[in-house]
Amino acid sequence: MKQSSLGFTKNILGIKGIIIIIALSISYQIYIDNFVDQEEFSFADVSYGITSFVVGIVSLIVAKRYKGSPVFGKSYFALGIGFITIFVGDLIYNYYSLVLEEDPYPSIADAFFLGFYVFAGYHLVKNIKYFKKNLSVTSKLGVPIIASLLIGGFGLFTIETLNDDPTVYFMGILYVSASATILSLAIFGATIFRNSVLGMAWFMLVIGIFIYSFTDVWYYYIEELGEYTTIHPVNTLWLIAYMFMIYALYRHKKII
């Protein structure tokens, strides 16, 4: 009876958290639609970097709680470093864009943005292997198949931009390849982690990574076509992803 009550309470907390995230996301989209001038500096210009920094710090706090663990300590440390590299990349990106008034893409900022995928991939693979030691052939093939479909789709639908700037086109392919791989791992991880000891906390973290990776793929598609703006809904989706991860890490910290 106590276990069922505890499970019910956890589910309620999860639902409340999701409702709050949705409400904040709608509020943010209303804010950027009505109050953000794309010609002037605003919170929208730095919200991406700030929220990634918060996720990184909270991940490092969770990693500290797992100190000594050969799996969780290292994997959460890697996740934290990954999001901090995004923060550094965003600082450089905004420096090029807002201070130097130069096109920040491609630039050295991309090295930091791409670095995130390495750390996030390490985190997901480390945890997937821990919770599911014997992976089936179907599971092993699923990740590259999903990733290949996404990469192929991106390349096909943006091929007309290749002649405009080959460097930007192939940078987009590189980013989408990394994002699609993380997205595929997140889908696979979500099916495993929802049944783990930490249940909802694990699941929400992976859902956050999934939304982030999906948004990355969408962003590089619209960026390649020249349709990206600071008020595009893709920015709100990134914020949703970060809020999911922050909430999941908070719940994770409360449990361990």
Image: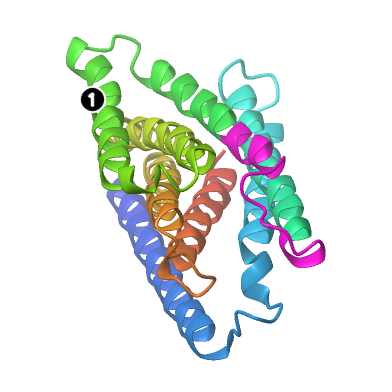
Q: Residue at x 71, y 33 (%)?
A: 64
Percent position of residue 39, x then y: 65, 81
Q: Residue 161, relative to residue 230: is it above or below?
A: above
SS class, disc 1: helix
How many numbered tags mark residues here? 1
Quarter-of-image position of residue 43: bottom right
Is residue 49 visible to us here? yes
Residue farthest toward the front in the current orientation of the protein: 163
Observer-nearest of 99 and 211: 99
Percent position of residue 250, x then y: 57, 52
Q: Residue at x 39, y 30 (%)?
A: 181
Q: Residue at x 45, y 68 (%)?
A: 21
Observer-nearest of 11 and 156: 156
Q: Residue 33, relative to residue 77: is it above or below?
A: below
Three-letter code, disc 1: Ile
Q: Is residue 219 left or right of residue 113?
A: left
Q: Residue 63, relative to residue 98: is it above or below?
A: above
Percent position of residue 100, x then y: 81, 61
First to last magenta residue range = 97-116
Residue farthest toward the right in the current orientation of the protein: 99
Q: Residue 245, relative to residue 26: is it above or below?
A: above
Observer-nearest of 198 and 158: 158
Q: Residue at x 53, y 84 (%)?
A: 31
**Is the image coloured rainbow, by chain, by secondary structure, or in one colour?**
rainbow
Residue farthest toward the bottom in the current orientation of the protein: 34
Percent position of residue 71, x then y: 56, 19
Is residue 208 visible to us here? no
Q: Which residue is mark 1?
A: 145
Question: Is the residue marked by circle 1 packed among few (<14), some (14-19), or many (20+) residues within 10 Å?
Answer: few
Q: Is residue 71 magenta?
A: no
The quadrant of the image that shows the C terminus is top right
